[in-house]
Image: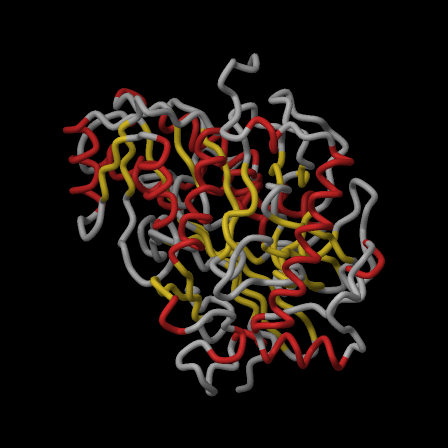
Amino acid sequence: MEVEPLEYWNPILETLPQEQTRDLQLRKFRRLYEWVFAKSPLYRRKYAAAGLAPGDIRTWDDVARVPLLTKDDYRCQGVAPFPYGETLCVPLEDVTIFHQTSGTTGTPVYQPDTWADWEWWSECWASILWAQGFRPSDRVFIPFGYNIFVAYWAGHYACEKIGCEVVPGGVLGTRERLMKMKELQTTAFMATPTYVLGMAETVRKELGGDPREWGVQKILCAGEPGALVPSTKKRMEEAWGCPVCDHVGATEVGAWSFECRHQPGGLHVNEAAFLVELLELDSDATVTRPGVPGRIVISSFDRQAQPCVRFDTKDVSMWSERQCGCGRTWRILDKGVHGRVDHITKVKGVLFSPVTVEEVVRSFDELQGEFEIHVEKRGDLDYIGLKIEMPPGIGADPRKELLTNLASALRWKTQLNLDIQPVEFGTLPRYQVKAKRFHDRRGEKG
């Protein structure tokens, strides 16, 4: 795929030499640090306890001394100003929009944004959409239950910003959304990988059609790692007959990374708007070498109301050695987000990631349904089980062969023997947003 004349939303920043990008990042980080020190009691206490004062951040070594921020810092909402607490950096009357996290990792985090912050969100998303080939000629359907979660809100406004026609899916059910997409001949849509596959399944089984004939030309995925899991990406692209690109962001952080239309096998980091660091999984030492997994730590440079400074996302990735054919100079995270630190765990003494199971399951064309992974203690030993939906109407011999091949592939890929529990197709939960397929119950009582 060649670079087109209008490849970049912001050609100056997206092609800035890496040395100049690093200089820009250091200047922006110093400004951000001084802003939160002056405006936020929580940040001020953290930095004073670490022996840091305004003006102490001059070099990259100084940046590494700045304490990390976690979700628990954001959750101290029991003090004024209500409901945000001491991370708020602007007068309460300057807050124009509220969102919160989904709560999948605990108590939800409340996120305030000013009008300028929301413009910043849209600008970050515009870079993503443009990089993935969205253009003013597109009619974009957003099958998203608009709610207090940020999800595709910013994507909606960024589509408008770059000139796309937007069709919001709102309160419609899956079937109604698909019928509206077909009626309006939409050329693109956004969804989680799970929902992309679920929508294709609904087209085939309930509407009696073939998604590949609907004229969709591009799909943007977010919310789950699936769009950079090769077998899941392949399944989505085959189902809809078009490219699928990934995006990773967070309510607390913003829209910080994306896969461009050249699909480099990882995520570009928007290094003009964010500082992304990788730290060792079991320490706070910086990871700079490609191919070494690390925790993703992010600072958002240009957010005002509740900025994040060295926020430990608990997600895991590693730097890539590859350069992308798109010509962007921003660094790439190889294979995107590999999972969360609290999901990448030892089972029977073996380091295990649920994403590996997804990669294996989605590589079997026969397995079009859902799956769930359960880890628990049985006596003193770890037990790991996999519930997997069987194809409708499968015979006894094909079923036996499928389960044998699946067990072998999982054993080879994970170095573990998973207890495979076949269930009837359609019995496991379906998800429109983040899927909850991994359940580690070893810490539960009773």
Q: Quadrant of residue 350?
A: bottom right
- At 42% across and 33% down in the image, what residue appears? 236
Q: From what the image shows, is residue 290 above or below residue 69?
A: above
Compared with 368, 102 (above or below) is below
Locate residue 263, reporting x and y percent. Answer: 57, 27
Residue 161, image x, y percentages = 35, 36
Vertical arrangement, residue 305 with respect to residue 186, above or below? below
How many dots with numbers? 0
Counting from the top left corner in percent of width and height, residue 266 is at 62, 36
Residue under the image location 71 percent in, 63 percent down? 346
Which residue is pictured at 49% across the width and 35% down the height? 127
Judge by depth and name the residue closer to the eye, 410 or 250: 250
Evaluate whether residue 417 shows in this view. Answer: no
Q: Is residue 188 left or right of residue 69?
A: left
User: Which of the colour schemes (rainbow, by chain, secondary structure, one colour) is used?
Assistant: secondary structure
Residue 323 pos. (x, y %): 71, 26
Q: Could you say which quadrant of the image residue 23 lies in? A: top right
Residue drawn at (61%, 49%) of the image: 274
Depth check, front residue: 376 or 167? 167
Q: Nearer the viewer, residue 237 or 332?
A: 332
* Quadrant showing the N terminus: top right
Residue 179 visible in the shown view: yes
